[in-house]
Amino acid sequence: MSKAPKKKWFVVLENETVDDCLKRMAAEGYVPIRRMEKPVFEETIENGNKVVKPVNQEIQFQGELTSDE
């Protein structure tokens, strides 16, 4: 049987809230120790020029295993 990693990243999915993600982490036995936010960009061409625009914000939590089982 393989052991769960001591630290793991959880991404807030498109169809869930931050609270839902934290509950998912707790259900797997992790507590949040770090939060990161990254912008998601989209490239479009306007008037012959490449334009990069932010379209979304990706939120990630790093979780640490609460106990060694």
Image (spheres, rainbow, N blue to C red):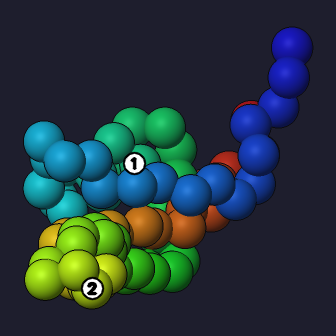
Left or right of residue 57: residue 38? right
| Tag 2: amino acid | Asn
Image quadrant where residue 46 sits? bottom left
Callouts 2 and 1 close, C-beta under 8 Å: no
| Tag 1: amino acid | Ala
The answer for how far apart the CA atoms under marks 2 and 1 are is 46 Å
Query: Along the line of sight, which residue is nearer the eye, 46 or 62?
Result: 46
Residue at x-position 45% and y-position 68%: 61
Query: Along the line of sight, which residue is nearer the eye, 60 or 41?
Result: 41
Query: Residue 53: horizontal and vertical position, in percent?
Result: 21, 83
Query: Along the line of sight, which residue is nearer the eye, 42 or 61?
Result: 42
Residue at x-position 23% and y-position 70%: 44
From this view, report whether residue 39 is shown above or below residue 31.
Answer: below
| Camera sees residue 54 | no
Query: Residue 17: horizontal and vertical position, in percent?
Result: 13, 56
Image quadrant where residue 6 sits? bottom right
Q: Secondary structure at mark 2?
A: strand
Left or right of residue 42: residue 36? right
Q: Residues within 10 Å of mark 1 (few under 14, many from 20)?
A: some
From this view, report whether residue 20 is shown above or below residue 59.
Answer: above
| Camera sees residue 29 | yes
The C terminus: image quadrant: top right
Mark toward the viewer: 2 or 1: 2
From this view, report whether residue 24 is shown above or below residue 9.
Answer: above
- Residue carrying label 2: 49
- Residue carrying label 1: 26
